[in-house]
């Protein structure tokens, strides 16, 4: 609403609005609006011109009605008229209406643009601002097209008022955001950059937003802004709080401008010029110093403004990552915030510190705050802050504090929010692996992890434990002992059972000496969990059992008993049943040697990127790990799994054992693989091979690498032009079917009734002989029952320049559409040539011409009057319309050309019967040429719909 | 079954709230207000499902009645109940308005307790209700009277009490029909049907047995076979085909099913005896002939002729023709020979009113509509011309043949009863496309 002074208020509008507000129901409101709309229409329609005031009033009412959600389809013209008014309020309402209601309306946009142009070129700053605001509010592509050239000029002109410059800068920013291709800065660049030096702080603030946006797109062009921004920043920072007067906000000089400047600087690397850099460092130091000063006001606005600048400055310091001194100071400053009362500040401090931790200079400094962070993790009320604290702990972790941090995170896991548990678990798993010095600690940690947050432990985590245990000889015994102890808990998580089953199956022998963990005790312990587990775990346990048989022959009978029980051997799950049956057989038939070979200990795994890291990367939670760290992790992981690379040979064993499973899908544990026919049961090995998703890829490559040479043995796809070749022979029986540099194929054919004979002549055009020349004729797909084609064999050798002949016998069994394929293969100078052609056998070849008189013809024509029996096509003539040629073609088609039948002598009519073995299909044809339009109309009727259609298709290509 | 019943005013404030079942919480009241009343007409369906709770609502002027349930109830039953509830309220205190509801809210709660029991609809017969729910203070009734009420309400004939006595036995029968029509501009009937009601007001003594007869085709044909087909010959159309009908609970349905005769012991006072619908051979009382011509982009000429199509001796009343105008109308000039016509901007229509019109007459209106050129490319959708009227005959052709009253116990016979029959045909949705 315009600022309504007493004399300027629009009473009618106020009354209307209060009427609407007083409406008791929707219906009443609609009635009132309809009435008002009718009134406005009659006013706008009225012959006498309205004065500016009433026009403004009615446009305002329309706007109000529109904002209530009703469609307005008139009044645009009046609004545009208002634009040319000299009164501020009228112009303003006009612009308001247009920026709200006008979309790219072709008729009015010109008028509007004109009005805007006038205002832009007027010297009145208020009008210019209104126009600029309108452009920015609409912000459409049309607007950009019309004014993108004009606005930069206004922006940099010397005589433009400051307020207009401000609007122009923001307007340009808006247009740039909607259609960056239209806003070309080019020549204006340096002058826009120099706006940073402007006296007026408002202009600088507006300009800096524009420059930041532009420099993100093309940083090089705006490079010069860095030094200007630095000097501007230093002037602001060093100014006393009273210097900037209007732009001092609660004793902080120009906080918004400072933040924007710092953000602009973050688009660029540290300045190379020493002086500039010195000045900037000085500024940053001053900002840090100021943060230490006692606050000048107790108001929250003061501290907010100050902290906003400080955090931007710290972001800049982190972005530069080159000033150890500053980084450490920033870190200390943040450390203070870690204990601040304000939750938001604590959050921001944690977040910034997370990035600081990745810098080599400040990493140590960050580490000093570990106690505070751990405390935050425990005591913080807000879950998002706790999440940041966890992120920070993860980021600051290294070898020195890993044990402490992992322990803290583990204890936090018990109370952690469900939403972040899975991520926490992954982080703990990674940290434990990355910084593990002693592997018993690692195993302990992970088992603890599974115990505490079993549900959130993803597959990758426990795969990884097993990989590591298998690859490290020194922990195997310890691992076996620990899992054995862990499994003794009355309720343990399924993941724990999986790890336990696997490890005991492999290394149970290492702890078997102890009578408390004798083989039978181990087995009974595992088996006590069996019935509580899901199918995949049970399958794994069965594999562990067969491994037990190998490790401890004394358990054999017990385990066989278990396998033999109905619940295993007749299990409804096919995988379990199969494993039970096969393991039972294996254990009873195979000798110990065989058993020992098949069920040998798993070979170490080849080194790969930790699957857990890959998973965390995928998750990519907020404030997740930077790429740097990940790579570091990978490196360290490499050390950990030591010597994986040396045993390259293992790769093949795994691949081989994997290949024995019928479908090496990425299916975990290979559970869904079909029945395994091979005598060798899937060893426990196959369980883990699938752990590596990449292994599957490998195998695919292996399988598909074999047949590259086989590809060319198959028939080549038909030549693209073979359809054209086919059409050439619809109306004739003899000719050249195909020709290239090497080979020419001639054709000669004759048809009688439903039988045909075709002679193919293969001519060698070169001087070199063709060897292993073979041809095959095939009837693809549906054609097979419709056409019987027999080709006599052809000489396998064609001398240079010679010709060989092949006879093909054809019998038509039923009507058909496709053509048989002829495939020719031969070697020419060692290179295999392979080509496929369509043999020109079409349905019309089996025509028997029928002569009939006019009335006979029309009688039959009428008999075949069902719509599906007729096929009609109207097409343009592709050859000259010569009566004799057409006649020749129709005769070549095989039908009888009937003279004096059609009343119009221009038209052609034909009749014929297609002879197939199964039936005879009578067909009638009528071709009506139109010489003027160079068009034909072709109508075919036959007793079979497919025949009419096919004939019509074939013939339409001929004329 | 119905879990609760709420009555709101137009703002969505709750006037009456009665919850019958525990599964309906207080928040259901707010859910309906927020999602339906305040949805600014976005919700058109009378049944709304919010959070597994169903709301059935009807609107009477500015008052919303909403029945709530969490169960899978018969929606038709719920609406029937809501309509009945409206009838009962009107019978007790007249028009349903916020004012009236506020003034009678004790009474409404009392009624709700009576007609809905744990969500199951009970006796909602106004006559019966009025015997024990009164607006005056209840005179201390004697024990006998009380037990009489109990036995009547719970007895076989719950709608009539015994011992009614009138000096004059009188009977009023109204056949009220509303005729609905959609006609093409060329005068082709696209759809037409009549929905009618037979409303009775009876002031009869004792427990009379009544028998109602009308020219139902099935009955007439049956009798025709019997041999007495005297009056079928006299005038062309004598019987009508009734598509479907429903009866007041007093009608013996078994007898209707077997003999198709309507016999009943009537309630005292006013009630609706039956409802029916016919679709064949409808007498259309008026024919509307529209003529719309567009003269350029800024002008529209409309001419509408109405023809009355019934006996010249009959008079139609309250005739109103509503001619929609385009949305960009800026001025209208109307000329009509009869009645008054006016352009109502708030309704975007020309309304032409004629007080009275005899049969077989015709009348005409012509209007010039000026249009404001708009930049909108949408064409005017040309809504149909609608009409309202009232005629003193039944457009379906229904005729009351007899209404016999037998009261064996008291000494008055069928001839002593004074009977009045009246036919009123009104327009329902009576539209002609233009």
Image (tube, coloured by chain):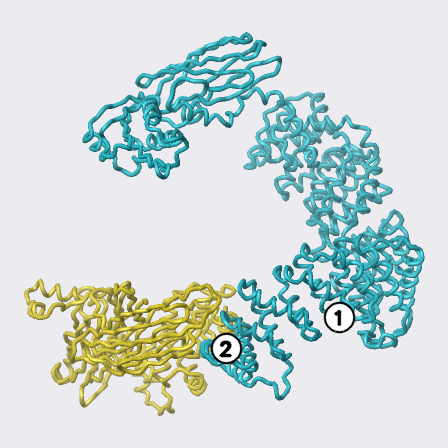
Chain colours: A cyan, B yellow
| Residue A890 picture location, percent across and down | 33, 26
Does residue A324 appear anywhere in the picture? Answer: yes
Quadrant of the rendered image containing residue A799: top right
Question: Is the same chain shared between marks 2 and 1?
Answer: no
| Residue A160: image tag | 1
- Mark 1 packing: few (<14 Cα in 10 Å), some, or many (20+)? some
| Residue B12: image tag | 2
> Seen in the image, is B393 located left or right of residue A397?
left
| Residue A667 picture location, percent across and down | 63, 37
From the viewer's side, name the closer residue of A5 and A681. A5
| Residue A904 picture location, percent across and down | 25, 34
Location of the C terminus of chain A by quadrant is top left
Residue B288 vertical position relative to residue A825 in the rendered view, above or below: below
Residue at mark 1: chain: A
Residue B279 vertical position relative to residue A637 in the rendered view, above or below: below
> Seen in the image, is B289 located left or right of residue A633?
left
């Amino acid at each position: 609403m315009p600022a309504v002074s007493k004399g300027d208020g629009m009473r009618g509008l106020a009354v209307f609005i209060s009427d609407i507000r007083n409406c008791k129901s929707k219906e009443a409101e609609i009635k009132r609006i309809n009435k008002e709309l009718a009134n406005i229409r009659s006013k706008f329609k009225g012959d006498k011109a309205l004065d500016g005031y009433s026009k403004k009033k009615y446009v305002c009412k329309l706007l109000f009605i529109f904002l209530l959600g009703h469609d307005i389809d008139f009044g645009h013209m009046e609004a545009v008229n208002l634009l040319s008014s000299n009164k501020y309020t009228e112009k303003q309402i006009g612009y308001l209406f247009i920026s709200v209601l006008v979309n790219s309306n072709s008729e009015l946009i010109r008028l509007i643009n004109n009005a805007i142009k006038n205002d832009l070129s007027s010297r009145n700053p208020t009008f210019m601002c209104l126009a600029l605001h309108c452009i920015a509010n609409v912000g459409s592509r049309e607007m950009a097209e019309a004014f993108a050239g004009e606005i930069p000029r206004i922006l940099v002109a010397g005589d433009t008022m400051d307020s207009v410059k401000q609007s122009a800068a923001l307007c340009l920013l808006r247009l740039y955001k909607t259609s960056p291709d239209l806003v070309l800065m080019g020549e204006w660049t340096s002058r826009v950059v120099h706006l940073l030096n402007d006296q007026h702080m408002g202009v600088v603030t507006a300009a800096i937003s524009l420059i930041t946006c532009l420099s993100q797109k093309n940083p090089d062009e705006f490079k010069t802004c860095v030094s200007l921004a630095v000097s501007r920043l230093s002037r602001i920072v060093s100014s006393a709080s009273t210097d900037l007067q209007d732009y001092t906000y609660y004793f902080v000089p120009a906080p918004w401008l400072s933040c924007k400047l710092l953000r602009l600087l973050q688009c660029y690397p540290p300045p190379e010029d020493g002086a500039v850099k010195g000045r900037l460092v000085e500024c940053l130091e001053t900002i840090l110093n100021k943060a230490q000063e006692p606050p000048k006001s107790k108001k929250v606005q003061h501290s907010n403004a100050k902290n906003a600048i400080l955090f931007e400055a710290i972001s800049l310091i982190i972005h530069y990552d080159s000033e150890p001194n500053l980084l450490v100071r920033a870190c200390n400053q943040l450390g203070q915030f870690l204990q601040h009362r304000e939750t938001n500040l604590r959050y921001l401090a944690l977040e910034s510190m997370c990035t600081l931790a990745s810098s080599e200079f400040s990493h140590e400094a960050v580490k000093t705050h570990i106690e505070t962070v751990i405390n935050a993790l425990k005591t913080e009320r807000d879950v998002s802050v706790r999440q940041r604290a966890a992120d920070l702990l993860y980021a600051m972790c290294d070898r020195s504090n890993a044990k402490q941090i992992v322990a803290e995170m583990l204890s936090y896991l018990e109370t952690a929010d469900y939403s972040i548990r899975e991520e926490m678990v992954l982080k703990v798993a990674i940290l434990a692996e990355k910084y593990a010095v002693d592997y018993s600690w690692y195993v302990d940690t992970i088992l603890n992890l599974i115990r505490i947050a079993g549900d959130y432990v993803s597959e990758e985590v426990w795969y990884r434990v097993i990989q590591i245990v298998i690859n490290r000889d020194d922990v195997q015994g310890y691992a076996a002992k620990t899992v054995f102890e862990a499994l003794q808990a009355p309720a343990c998580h399924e993941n724990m059972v999986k790890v336990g089953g696997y490890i005991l199956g492999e290394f149970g022998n290492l702890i078997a000496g102890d009578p408390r963990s004798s083989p039978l005790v181990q087995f009974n312990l595992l088996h006590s969990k069996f019935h509580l587990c899901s199918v995949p775990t049970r399958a794994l346990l069965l594999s562990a059992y067969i491994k037990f048989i190998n490790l401890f022959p004394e358990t054999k009978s017990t385990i066989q008993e278990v396998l033999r029980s109905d619940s295993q051997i007749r299990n409804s799950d096919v995988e379990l049943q199969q494993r039970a049956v096969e393991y039972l057989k294996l254990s009873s038939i195979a000798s110990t040697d065989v058993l020992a070979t098949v069920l040998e200990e798993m070979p170490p795994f080849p080194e790969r990127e930790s699957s857990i890291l890959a998973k965390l990367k995928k998750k990519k939670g907020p404030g997740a790990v930077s790429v740097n760290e990940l790579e570091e992790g990978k490196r360290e992981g490499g050390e950990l799994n030591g010597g994986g690379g040396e045993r390259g040979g293992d790769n093949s064993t795994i691949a081989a054992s994997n290949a024995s499973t019928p479908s090496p899908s990425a299916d975990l544990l290979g559970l869904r693989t079909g029945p395994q026919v091979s005598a060798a049961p899937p060893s426990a090995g196959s369980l883990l091979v699938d752990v590596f998703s990449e292994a599957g890829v490998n195998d695919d490559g292996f399988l598909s690498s074999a047949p590259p040479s086989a590809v060319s043995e198959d028939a080549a796809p038909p030549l693209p032009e073979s359809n054209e070749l086919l059409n050439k022979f619809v109306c004739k029986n003899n000719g050249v079917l195909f020709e290239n540099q090497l080979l020419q194929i001639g054709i000669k054919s004759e048809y009688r009734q439903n039988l045909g004979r075709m002679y193919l002549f293969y001519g060698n055009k070169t001087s070199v002989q063709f060897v292993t020349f073979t041809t095959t004729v095939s009837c693809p797909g549906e054609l097979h029952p419709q056409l019987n084609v027999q080709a006599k064999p052809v000489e396998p050798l064609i001398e240079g320049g010679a010709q060989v002949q092949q006879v093909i016998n054809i019998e038509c069994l039923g009507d058909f559409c496709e053509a048989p394929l002829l495939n020719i293969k031969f070697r020419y100078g060692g290179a295999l040539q392979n080509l496929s052609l369509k043999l020109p056998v079409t349905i019309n070849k089996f025509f028997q011409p029928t002569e009939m008189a006019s009335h006979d013809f029309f009688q039959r024509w009428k008999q075949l009057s069902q719509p599906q029996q007729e096929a009609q096509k109207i097409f343009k003539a592709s050859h000259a319309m010569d009566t004799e040629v057409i006649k020749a073609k129709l005769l070549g088609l095989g039908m009888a050309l009937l003279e004096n039948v059609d009343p119009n002598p221009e038209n052609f009519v034909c009749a014929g019967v297609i002879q197939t073995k199964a039936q005879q299909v009578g067909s009638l044809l009528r071709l009506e040429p139109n010489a003027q339009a160079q068009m034909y109309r072709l109508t075919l009727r036959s007793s079979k719909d497919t025949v009419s259609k096919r004939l019509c298709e074939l013939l339409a290509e001929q004329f | 079954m119905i879990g609760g019943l709420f009555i709101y005013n137009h703002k969505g404030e709750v006037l009456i709230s009665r919850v019958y079942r525990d599964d309906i919480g207080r928040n259901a009241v707010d859910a309906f207000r927020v999602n339906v009343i305040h949805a600014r007409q976005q919700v058109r369906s009378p049944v709304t499902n919010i959070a597994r709770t169903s709301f059935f609502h009807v609107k009477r002027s500015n008052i919303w009645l909403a029945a709530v349930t969490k169960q899978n109830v018969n929606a038709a039953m719920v609406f029937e109940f809501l309509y009945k509830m409206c009838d009962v309220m009107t019978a007790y205190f007249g028009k349903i308005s916020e004012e009236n509801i506020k003034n009678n809210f004790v009474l409404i709660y009392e009624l709700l307790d009576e007609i809905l029991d744990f969500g199951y609809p009970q006796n909602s017969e106004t006559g019966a209700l009025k015997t024990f729910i009164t607006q005056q203070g209840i005179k201390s009734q004697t024990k006998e009277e009380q037990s009489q009420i109990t036995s009547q309400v719970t007895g076989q004939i719950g709608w009539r009490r015994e011992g009614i006595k009138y000096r004059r036995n009188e009977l009023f029968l109204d056949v009220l029909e509303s005729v609905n029509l959609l006609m093409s501009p060329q005068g082709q009937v696209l759809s037409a049907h009549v929905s009618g009601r037979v409303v009775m007001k009876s002031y009869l003594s004792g427990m009379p047995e009544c028998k109602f007869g009308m020219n139902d085709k099935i009955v007439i044909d049956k009798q025709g076979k019997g041999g007495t087909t005297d009056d079928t010959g006299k005038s062309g159309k004598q019987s009508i085909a009734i598509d479907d009908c429903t009866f007041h609970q007093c009608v013996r349905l078994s007898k209707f099913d077997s003999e198709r005769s309507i016999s009943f012991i009537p309630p005292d006072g006013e009630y609706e005896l039956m409802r029916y619908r016919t679709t064949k051979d409808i007498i259309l009382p008026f024919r509307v002939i529209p003529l719309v011509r567009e003269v350029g982009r800024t002008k529209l000429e409309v001419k509408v002729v109405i023809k009355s199509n019934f006996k010249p001796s009959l008079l139609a009343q309250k005739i109103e023709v509503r001619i929609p105008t385009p949305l960009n109308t800026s001025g209208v000039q109307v000329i009509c020979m009869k009645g008054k016509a006016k352009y109502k901007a708030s309704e975007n229509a020309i309304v032409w009113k004629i007080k009275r019109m005899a049969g077989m007459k015709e009348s005409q209106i012509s209007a010039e509509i000026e249009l404001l050129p708009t930049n909108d490319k949408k064409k005017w959708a040309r809504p149909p011309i609608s009409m309202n009227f009232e005629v003193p005959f039944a457009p379906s052709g229904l005729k009351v043949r007899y209404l016999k009253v037998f009261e064996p116990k008291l000494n008055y016979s069928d001839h002593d009863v004074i009977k009045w029959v009246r036919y009123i045909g009104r327009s329902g949705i009576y539209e002609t496309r233009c």
